[in-house]
Image (cartoon, helix red, strand yellow):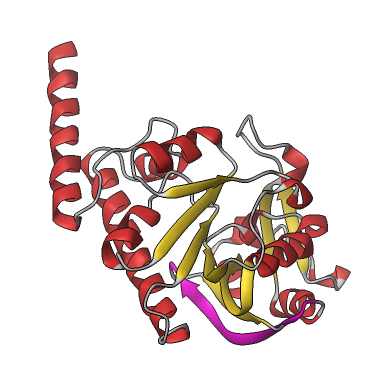
Amino acid sequence: MEMIAELENQHIIQLAKELGSRFRVSAEIHAEDLLFKFFTSMTPGEQSIVRYFESGHGDANQIYHTARSLVPETKDPRVLDFAAGFGRVSRHFSAIMPTARLSASDIHQAAVEFLRGVLAIDAIKSDGVPRKSSLPKDEFDFIFSLSFFSHMPDYRFLDWLRLLLSALKPNGYLLFTTHGDATMRQYPQLAALYDPEKGCGYGVGLGTDQTDIEGENYGTAITDFNYVAGKIKQLPARMVTFRSAGWWGHQDEWIIQRIG
């Protein structure tokens, strides 16, 4: 049995190398990569590796086309992948748009070290509290944050939007995703977090299994359109586009532009 397990492991490693070569990216996957663990829990074996690389490439390609449409005159845009994890998307974005000056940010020190040391991507350590974050100000033409605000408690939501907006250059763009109506229709267990009778447009289940994130700063959040739109109105920003279920068939996509 040990020999079979070893052969299977070698086969998985070889498959990762083939996929890395196919997409022209690093084939390395960190042992603490939570998204890869998620894929493994959903589709064990080969398919988890395939989904990890194919989904990363697909998401990066979608981001690339969005960035090009928003900043078409900028040949080498300054781009930030916020809450980048271990580079599932960043590694592909670097390959798809090599002219972009890409940085990534994550709360996990191991992820920051992996991004820098293995993927050769400039990385910035984040924090669970926005005011403690070390993101530079007025730096980026475009920031994308996939499935980050879908985990933020209400009392952090606006502060994080403010922080990311301040990291943009004037007139720069922020793309982020949330759990909205489409998510609630597809996932009843998540819809149960949302109580329309409260009228706040928001629901959350707090808690995390990540040792370096405090439970009160993270969870699973559900937000309706009016909730998010109301937060945006409190910012020096304008809404550019909203797409219901614009990501992964259920998360909403929001693009806003910094004003001034």
User: With respect to residue 4, does 255 lie above or below?
Assistant: below
Residue sitting at 40 percent across and 86 percent down?
A: 72
Residue 190 point in image, percent of width and height: 63, 58
Residue under the image location 14 percent in, 27 percent down: 10
In which quarter of the view is residue 212 placed?
Answer: top right
- On the rendered structure, is 70 left or right of 212? left
Residue 199 appears left or right of 224: right
Q: Residue 62, how many percent across, how many down? A: 37, 73
Whole-percent x, y for residue 192 in the image: 70, 59
Region of the chain picked out in magenta, as a range: 235-248
Residue 139 versus residue 184: which sits nearer the camera?
139
User: Residue 205 versus residue 169: which sits nearer the camera?
Assistant: 169
Residue 67 appears in the rendering: yes
- Quadrant of the rendered structure where residue 160 is? bottom right
Give whichever of 14, 5 is nearer the camera. Answer: 14
Look at the image and say whether residue 8 sits in the magenta stretch. Answer: no
**Depicted 80 relative to depicted 207: above or below:** below
